[in-house]
Image: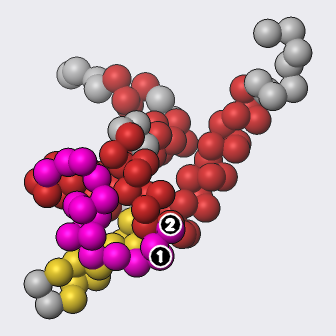
Amino acid sequence: MTLHKTTLFNSELQQAAGLFKALSHPARLAILKYLAETKVCMTGDICQELPLSRTTVNQHLKELKDNNLIKGTIDGVKVNYCLNNDKLRTMSDILNTFLSELDCCNDNNC
């Protein structure tokens, strides 16, 4: 029986890694920032804001949606996307907890 390397780590680290991976591309960060500024928008609007093709933007939207960082509602033939504030708060808590466990902000010996 072969173990996947991810099974060697606890669920908290796996959850954190999944969220951090979702943030690991500048296009996805730009999408989140744009949605924060506009509150709600349609995918067409996002495509106009990024120097990427519609297909590429849709792939990044899918990654964000798969990680529940954004929500989408269907409006006719368009999908309106907005931030999932509950998940973003959870992600903020996860990041703050992780950084506090590293104690990186209190160590002046680095």
When asked about the image quadrant of residue 41, the answer is bottom left
Q: Amino acid at mark 2?
A: Ala
Determine crowd level at label 2: few under 14, some 14-19, many 20+ residues with C-alpha closer than 10 A: some
**Is 98 covered by the magenta stretch?**
no
Magenta-colored span: 37-53
Q: Which numbered disc covers residue 36?
A: 2
When asked about the image quadrant of residue 105, the answer is top right
| Residue at the spot 59% in from the left edge and 58% down from the top edge | 90
Q: Is residue 90 left or right of residue 45?
A: right
Which residue sits furthest bottom? Answer: 76
| Residue at the spot 43% in from the left edge and 43% down from the top edge | 23
Front-most of 82 and 13?
A: 82
Q: Amino acid at mark 1?
A: Lys
* Residue 45 in the image, given as x and y percentages of width and height: 27, 70
Q: Which residue is mark 1?
A: 39
Residue 92 can be seen in this image: yes
Q: Is residue 77 above or below residue 4?
A: below
Front-most of 38 and 69?
A: 38
Q: Is residue 33 left or right of residue 47?
A: right
* Residue 75 in the image, given as x and y percentages of width and height: 21, 89
Residues marked 2 and 1 touching at CB (< 8 Å): yes
Quarter of the rendering occupied by the C terminus: top right
